[in-house]
Amino acid sequence: MRHILTSTVILSSLLLPAAAFASKPADDPAATTPAPRITTGVIGPFLVNSLNLTAPQGPDASFLPADAQVGVSFVVDEKGVPENIQVTKSINPSWDSQVVEAVSKLHYRPARIDDQKIPVDMNLTVVIAK
């Protein structure tokens, strides 16, 4: 029984340092971890011209709620042109078409990542006040 106990103590003291050398700590400089890509060259789209709307004439103009809002979503492509314009919050079809037409005439300086032009999804809320 003494031999088994003695051999167990001796073997465990030999295997413990081997296990310590086999596993590398997380802060080991020799450990291979991929370096994250860091960029500071992110530039969002910039509106070059402004949005001008004319009020539709007729009954649609008189039924406009106070501080009405039309929401649109679109993509600003690599050329700075809005594409795929969709109304996300509607007032009425007359105003919605006016807003979509005005947004389609907007021009942006395109977004960039590391000096490469990229398309960007945009959301725009147009507030129409009386």
Image (cartoon, rainbow, N blue to C red):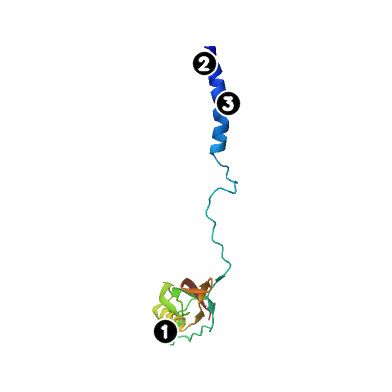
Considering depth in this image, is 93 or 5 the residue closer to the camera?
Answer: 5
Q: Nearer the viewer, residue 66 or 77?
A: 77
User: Where does label 1 land, which residue?
Assistant: 59
**Circle nearer the N terminus (2, 1):** 2
Dot 3: element: helix
Residue named by callout 3: 13
Mark 2–mark 1 CB contact (< 8 Å): no
Q: Earlier in the sequence, mark 3 or mark 2?
A: 2
Q: Residue at x 58, y 26 (%)?
A: 13
Q: Position of residue 87 (x, y in %)?
A: 42, 74
Total labels: the figure holds: 3
Q: Which residue is mark 2?
A: 4
What residue appears at the point 56 percent right and 21 percent down from the top-left corner?
A: 9
Q: CA distance from mark 2 to mark 1?
A: 100 Å
N-terminal label among 1 and 3:
3
Classify mark 1: helix, strand or loop: helix
Q: For the residue marked with disc 3, what is the amino acid?
A: Ser
For residue 32, above or below residue 112: above
Q: Percent from the top left, x then y, of residue 12?
A: 55, 25
Question: Circles 1 and 3: CB distance less than 8 Å?
Answer: no
Gap between marks 1 and 3, in whole Å? Answer: 92 Å
The Cα atoms of the two marked residues, 3 and 2, are separated by 14 Å
Q: Specify whether 38 is left or right of 96.
A: right
Q: Given the image, on which type of amino acid does mark 2 rest?
A: Ile
Horizontal and vertical percent position of residue 68: 49, 75
Q: Position of residue 92 (x, y in %)?
A: 41, 77
